[in-house]
Image (cartoon, coloured by chain):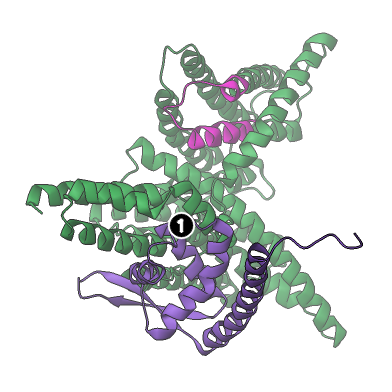
């Protein structure tokens, strides 16, 4: 074989291997086994006088139809169609060692977070008095997120000083502002600060997660995907944890031991903190195990939410009733818009940008436009309330959030409609949504840092 | 002459086990051996051997290991296990029974062909 023939043969084998790898039922080790067969066959044929290209074709033909072959493999290994959680690849060597180190580090950080949340107890801070509970609530994200960030700093080898300095500074500033303000007890600004601090800090986690790709659309999109999958893993772990705790309480009760203190003081807080790290590690270790769960749920619920909004708007117009928005309603409507945004983000994250617009995109636009109208109606109601009762921290926070959503949804609707009319690209929508992430974090930071002094810590 | 798929499928277990009972082998070598032994009449599609090997491995009849071959590539070798030898003996008994039955049938068919057609009873 000449060097030229050799190169083209290698290219053909590469392509064949890539093609085979995409089959779920055929694992990498099987591809390696089949490749050895293919190469042996080719060299036999070349020795018999065929040139490399001919030998490749004959060998491929003898190997048989790939669809039939992967059906045979699926038949023999039907478990493979159920994606398994392979934490440690069965291959020996470097990947396995790396996976093990990764797991050890992740569990190390999980243990650190679980311990950290109990450190204040050493200084006599229990869970009993209101002031103590408020201390924990104000600092909850600081017990967990620094460890999560550290895990990703380690995992992405993000050891350049300027980024690290920035990340550390953000956490220090957060710790200061979470604790120095003299909040009035039970004050609204304090509740707002407790709610918004994790949102602001979540972006710091994102910067570490993206590992130097934060300024790219793809890097931020991956972080959005990660957030959704982590949420799902966390809910699953929490449900498992609930069952575990129930059994724990039950079987110890049988021998007359009350485990309530252990459960509420140790198991719950430490478990809840550690589970964030474990969930993050699981999302990373096997992106394929519950792959695309967030987009699947999105597909289910997008039509339902679109229907809900259309029905609500129709009822609003038909009956001519005004929206009566008190404090609880404000939060409910804000949460609703967060859910819509989530639906929008996850369907964007799972969509192949090169696909032409389809039925689901139309539905998506209906959702966005109807959510936009609901948001506008909410804003109107908030404005009415502000003009009637004046500014309060809750109303201003809700006002700000609704304006942020309104801007986001309006431009998203414009971009989506452009895409539907084939005047724009889907990537523009993707870029808009990912570029918008810092806006939420910035607003959350404003609520944490600026609101309390402006509203007199009430 | 093409041998039909069901027969190929049914005979694959004893053939692979018998070849591996002689010496350890890897996919390509096993196939070459099958071709030589059957005089090219057993036309296996090359790829289909591997799911068979994996099934035998799962059942514990053979055991796989990776080795670096003389070509420098990693290669998966298979070795028959004691359980596989038992299975081979069992298969051998079953196939001998089938073979004996069929021989008897072929013989009686040949006799019919040679002798004049028997007269209908009672005429």
Chain whose colour in the figure is purple: B
Quick check: A34 above or below A219? below
Question: Is any atom of residue A77 visible in this view?
Answer: no
Q: Chain of mark 1?
A: A
Residue A353 belongs to the span the image colors magenta = yes
Q: Position of residue B123 (x, y in %)?
A: 90, 59
Q: Is residue A404 left or right of residue A263?
A: left
Q: Secondary structure at mark 1?
A: loop
Q: Position of residue A407 (x, y in %)?
A: 51, 21
Q: Nearer the viewer, residue B101 or B70?
A: B101
Question: Is any atom of residue A213 visible in this view?
Answer: yes
Q: Nearer the viewer, residue A415 or A435?
A: A415
Magenta region, main secondary structure: helix
Q: Colour of chain A?
A: green
Q: Nearer the viewer, residue A282 or A437?
A: A282
Q: Which residues are magenta?
A: A337-363
Quick check: A277 above or below A266? above
Q: Quadrant of the N terminus of chain A?
A: bottom left
Residue A449 belongs to the span the image colors magenta = no
The residue labelled by disc 1 is A26
* Residue shown at 55% from the left, 41% from the top: A452
> Dividing the picture into quarters, in which one does residue A269 lie?
bottom right
At label 1, counting other C-alpha atoms closer than 10 Å, the crowd grade (few under 14, some 14-19, many 20 or more) is many
């Amino acid at each position: 074989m000449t060097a030229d023939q050799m190169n083209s043969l290698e290219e053909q084998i590469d392509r064949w291997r890539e093609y085979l790898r995409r089959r779920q039922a055929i694992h990498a080790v099987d591809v390696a086994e089949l490749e050895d067969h293919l190469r042996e066959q080719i060299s036999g044929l070349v020795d018999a006088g065929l040139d490399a290209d001919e030998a490749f074709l004959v060998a491929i033909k003898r190997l048989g139809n790939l669809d039939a072959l992967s059906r045979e493999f699926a038949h023999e290994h039907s478990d493979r169609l159920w994606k398994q959680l392979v934490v440690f690849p069965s291959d020996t060597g470097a990947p396995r060692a790396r996976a093990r180190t990764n797991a050890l580090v992740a569990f190390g950080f999980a243990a650190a977070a679980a311990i950290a949340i109990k450190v204040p107890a050493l200084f006599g801070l229990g869970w009993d008095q209101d002031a103590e509970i408020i201390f924990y609530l104000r600092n909850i994200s600081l017990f967990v997120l620094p460890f999560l960030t550290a895990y990703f700093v380690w995992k992405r080898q993000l050891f350049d000083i300027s980024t690290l300095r920035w990340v550390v500074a953000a956490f220090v500033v957060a710790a200061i502002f979470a604790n120095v303000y003299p909040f009035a007890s039970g004050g609204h600004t304090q509740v707002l600060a407790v709610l918004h601090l994790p949102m602001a800090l979540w972006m710091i986690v994102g910067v570490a997660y993206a590992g130097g790709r934060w300024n790219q659309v793809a890097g931020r999109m991956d972080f959005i995907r990660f957030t959704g999958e982590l949420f799902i893993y966390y809910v699953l772990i929490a449900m498992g944890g609930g069952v575990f705790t129930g059994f724990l309480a039950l079987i110890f009760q049988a021998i007359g031991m009350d485990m309530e203190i252990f459960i509420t003081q140790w198991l719950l807080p430490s478990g809840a903190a550690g589970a964030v790290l474990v969930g993050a590690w699981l999302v990373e270790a096997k992106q394929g195990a519950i792959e695309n769960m967030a987009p699947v749920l999105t597909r289910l619920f997008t039509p339902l939410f679109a229907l809900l909004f259309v029905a609500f708007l129709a009822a609003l117009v038909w009956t001519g009733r005004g929206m009566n928005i008190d404090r609880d309603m404000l939060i409910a409507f804000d949460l609703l818009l967060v859910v819509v945004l989530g639906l929008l983000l996850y369907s964007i994250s799972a969509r192949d940008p090169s696909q032409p617009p389809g039925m689901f995109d139309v539905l998506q636009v209906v959702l966005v436009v109807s959510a936009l109208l609901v948001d506008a109606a909410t804003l109107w109601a908030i404005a009415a309330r502000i003009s009637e009762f004046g500014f309060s921290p809750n109303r201003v926070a809700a006002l700000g959030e609704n304006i942020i959503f309104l801007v986001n949804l309006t431009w998203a609707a414009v971009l989506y409609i452009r895409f539907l009319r084939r005047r724009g690209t889907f990537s523009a929508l993707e870029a808009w949504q990912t570029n918008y992430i810092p806006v939420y974090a910035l607003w959350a930071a404003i609520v944490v840092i600026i609101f309390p002094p402006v509203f007199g810590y009430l | 002459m093409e041998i039909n798929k069901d027969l190929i499928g049914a005979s694959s277990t004893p053939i692979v086990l018998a070849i591996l009972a002689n010496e350890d082998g890897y996919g390509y070598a096993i196939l070459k051996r099958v071709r030589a032994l059957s005089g090219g009449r057993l036309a296996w599609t090359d790829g289909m051997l591997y799911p068979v090997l994996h099934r035998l491995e799962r059942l514990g009849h053979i055991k796989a290991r990776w080795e670096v071959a003389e070509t420098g590539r990693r290669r998966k070798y298979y070795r028959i296990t004691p359980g596989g030898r038992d299975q081979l003996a069992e298969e051998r008994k079953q196939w001998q029974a089938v073979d004996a039955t069929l021989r008897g049938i072929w013989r009686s068919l040949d006799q019919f062909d040679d002798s004049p057609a028997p007269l209908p009873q009672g005429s």
